[in-house]
Amino acid sequence: MSNRLEDTISDIDFIKKLIPQKDPFVMIDKLLYFDTDKVISGLTITSENILTSSDNYFTEGGLVENMAQSIALHRGYRGYINRGKDEKPKTGFIGSIKHATIHSLPKVGTELLTTVEIIAEIMLVSLVKIEVRDEEGKLIASSEMKTIIVDR
């Protein structure tokens, strides 16, 4: 597949309409790539982020939440282009996390690039492979997640 975006989407207000999470718990700020089976999100880590530690590192919980919200972004943007602009994003939860590895904690100012590849989707359940890299391509974290949509 190829990228279905004409350009990067960095309008944070628009991004927030695509995911069910709300401030101060939004852990993505860009949509960089979208196709049927893949999404790449971006997040520039700030010291104001609720999941940034007092010593200016993004926490493990922040990385996991960034991964989960990237999955939600894929579903949200897919719903936006397929069903309409006024549809609210679907609520879901993480059913399982496998093979989660945190290689390093990124510092404030780092831009995270999170790639989600859908391995399988059956009804409201998705199995995905996720990699989080920094702007230089260094692998920060990876996992497989199973997510379940509970809001039709």
Image (cartoon, rainbow, N blue to C red):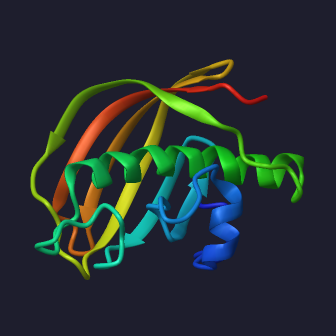
Q: Count numbered badges in the picture.
A: 0
Residue at image position (68%, 18%) is: 123
Q: Is residue 151 left or right of residue 116?
A: right
Q: Is residue 28 above or below residue 9?
A: above
Q: Is residue 112 left or right of residue 87?
A: left
Residue at image position (26%, 82%) is: 109
Q: Is residue 101 above or below residue 5?
A: above
Q: Nearer the viewer, residue 22 or 29?
A: 22
Report the quarter where the C terminus lies. top right
Q: Nearer the viewer, residue 4 or 73?
A: 73
Q: Quadrant of residue 97?
A: top left
Q: Is residue 1 visible?
A: no
Q: Is residue 98 above or below residue 15?
A: above
Residue 147: x and y in percent read 50, 28
Residue 16: x and y in percent read 64, 64
Q: Quadrant of residue 117?
A: top left
Q: Is residue 73 visible?
A: yes
Q: Is residue 21 left or right of residue 104?
A: right
Residue 122: x and y in percent read 62, 17
Residue 126: x and y in percent read 54, 26
Residue at image position (54%, 62%) is: 33
Residue at image position (19%, 66%) is: 53
Q: Is residue 4 left or right of residue 44?
A: right
